[in-house]
Amino acid sequence: MHPVLTDRGRLALYLLGWVMLAVLLALLVLEPGRSGLPGAVLLTLPPTLVYAFVCLAAWYPVRAMPLQRARTGPLLATHTVAAIILGGAWVMVLGIWARFLGAPLTPARTAAFFVTGALLYLLAVALHYLLAGLEHARRIETREIEVKMLAREAELKALKAQLDPHFLFNSLNSISSLCGSNPASARTLTTLLAEYLRKSLRIGGAETITLSEELELVASYVAIERIRFGPRLELAQDIEEAVRTLRVPPLLLQPLVENAVKHGVGQLLEGGVVHITAAREGGQIRISVENPCDPDRVPQEGEGIGLANARRRVEMFDGRMEIADRPDHFRVTLSLPT
Amino acid sequence: MSEPITVLIVDDEAPARALVRELLADHPQFLVTGECANGYEAVRAVAEHQPDLLFLDIQMPKLDGFEVLELLERRPQVIFVTAYDEYAVRAFEVHAVDYLLKPFSATRFGEVVAHAEEMVRRGGASNMAAASAQVRRPLQRIAFREGGTIDVVPVQRIDYLEAQDDYVHVYSRGRKYVKQQPLGELEALLDGTRFLRVHRSYIVNLESLARVEPYAKDSRVAILKDGTRVPVSRAGYERLREML
C-alpha cells in the first residue's frame, strides 16, 4: 500500500507541501504589471496539485528498487528517464493551462518549468525513499520484538518443564533419608541440587551458552539421579573437543536427557546407559541423546510435551530434530547451525 | 506383647527404602521382612513372605504400584509412598491405609504407621480386589501372572479377548495370556473406542480387525489381520456397524 495515500494526515501534509511549492513558483513567475500574485497562483496551483498526485507514482519504482539492493547505475538511469518524462508532461500541462488563461509561457519560462518539474519529481523520489526506509526499520523492529518474545516464552516454558516438581521432591526425600544414614552424602546431594538449580536459572536466562555449559548442567542432573537410581543409571559422553566451545540455545539438551532417564533407563529393571554424542558435521553441530528402553512400554501417541517443546525450540533456531523410536532403543538427534 | 507386624518395602530408589526402614526402627512393633526394588520382585516377595503391610512406591519400572496390587492374590494393607500427589484418589479407591507424599516428616510417618497398625490388628488383609477393577479407565496395559512369571501387555498389542468360564484369554501377537477376571469387567476398563464386544464371549481390538464375513444364516465371523476368525453375534454386528 502507498504510504501517503493510506494515511490521511500524511496526505494532507504532502499536499500542503505542494501548495507551498505552488505559491513559491507563483512568486518566481510574478511580473510587475501583470495580474499580480492571485493571477500567478492561479497559473501555478492547479498544475502543481495535479503534479503532486503524479509524483506519488514514484512509490512504485522506489519499492521495486530498494536502495539496499538496487545497483546505482540502473537506479540513476530509471529515475533520470522518469524525471525527464514527467518534467516534460508537467511543462505541457502547465503550457496548456497558461494558454487557457490567455498568457502563454515564454520559451525561457518553459525551460525553467521543465527543469523545476524534473527536480520536483526527484524530490518526490527522495521523499519516498525516506518513507520506505522508515517503514522498513519499523518492520524490522516489530519482527525483532516478536522473535524475542517467542524466545522468552520458550525459555520460560523450558525452565518450568526443567524444574519438574517430582524430581525436586524425590531428591528432597533422598536428602531426608541420607540425613540419618549418611550425613556426608546428604550434604553432597544438597550441594548438587543447589548447583543444579543455580545453573538452570543462570543458563535459562542467557540467549546462548556454550555446549560445555549445557553438558555441565546435564552432568549435575545425572549425578543427582544417580544417587536415587544407583548404578542402574549411567551416562556416557562422546563429545568432539572442538564443539565444546560452540554456542547453543540453553536448556535444549538437558530436557532430552531427563526424558531419557525418566521414560527410558528409569523404566528398565536392569537400568542402562544414556549416551550423548556431539560432533561438527558440515556447517552444523549434531547432538544426539540415546537410551535403551522397555520394549513392552505403552506406546506413546504423538510426542510428549518435553519432546514437542524441544522440537519447537530447535526449529526456532533454524535447526532440526529427528527421532528414532525403535522397540528397545530411543534416540533424539539435533542438528543446529553453528 | 503381640506378634510383630511384618513389613515389605517396595521402592526403586535405595535411599527411599532406607528412609522407611530407618523411621520404622522407632516403631518396634513392625518387623521389616524384605525390600524390593521393582514390581516383579514385590509380587514374588509378597507371595513368599505374606507380609501384613506394604510400603509401596507407585512409579516403578515395568509394573507400577497399582499393577502390583492387581497381581496379588492375598493383599496386605498398603501405604503408598510417592512424590506424585495425583494418585491420591486412586490410592483411596484401592483402600490404601494412607498416602505418604515424599518427602515426609517423622511425625506424619508415625501417624500413618499407627493407623496401619490398627488396620492390621483389626482386620487382617483388606478386600481390595473388587475395588481395583473400577479405578482406571481406560486401561493402558494389562499385567498377567502365571506362576512365577509376570507379563505386561500394552493394550494396543491385544488382538482379541475371549471369555472362558471365570477366566479371560487375552491374545496378543500369537500369544495367549490368562487372567482371572470376568470379561465384562475388563470390557469396562478398556478404551471403548478401540475395543468392541462383538459377541457375548469376545472383545475385538478394532485395529486388528480386517473384515467381517457372513458365516451362516443370521451369524457372521470377524477375520482379524492375522487370519484368526472370531464369531460375531447379531447384537455385536449392530454395535460394529454403529461404530464404523
Image (cartoon, coloured by chain):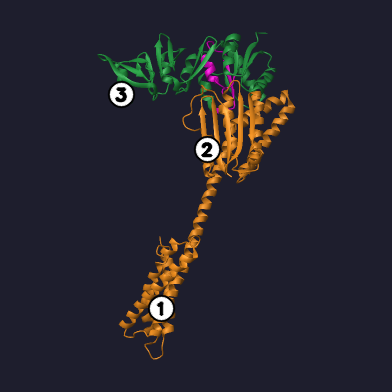
Q: Position of residue A186 (x, y in %)?
A: 71, 28
Viewer-nearest residue: A43 or A273: A273
Residue A105 sits above or below residue B4 on the image = below
Residue at 50% across / 58% down in the picture?
A138
Instruction: List the residue tagged with mark 2.
Output: A321
Q: Is residue B70 magenta?
A: yes
**What amino acid is labelled 2 in the image?**
Met
Q: In which quadrant of the rendered image does the C terminus of chain A lie? A: top right
Q: Is residue A235 magenta?
A: no
Q: Which chain is orange?
A: A
Viewer-nearest residue: A221 or A315: A315
Viewer-nearest residue: B107 or A319: A319
Residue A124 sits above or below residue A241 on the image = below
Residue at 54% across / 38% down in the picture?
A310
Give the label on residue A114, or none. 1
Asked if disc 2 and disc 3 are in contact, CB closer than 8 Å, the reply is no
Q: Chain of mark 3?
A: B
From the image, state whether disc 2 or disc 3 is nearer to you: 2
Q: Chain of mark 1?
A: A
Residue at 45% across / 62% down in the picture?
A65
Instruction: List the residue tagged with mark 3.
Output: B241
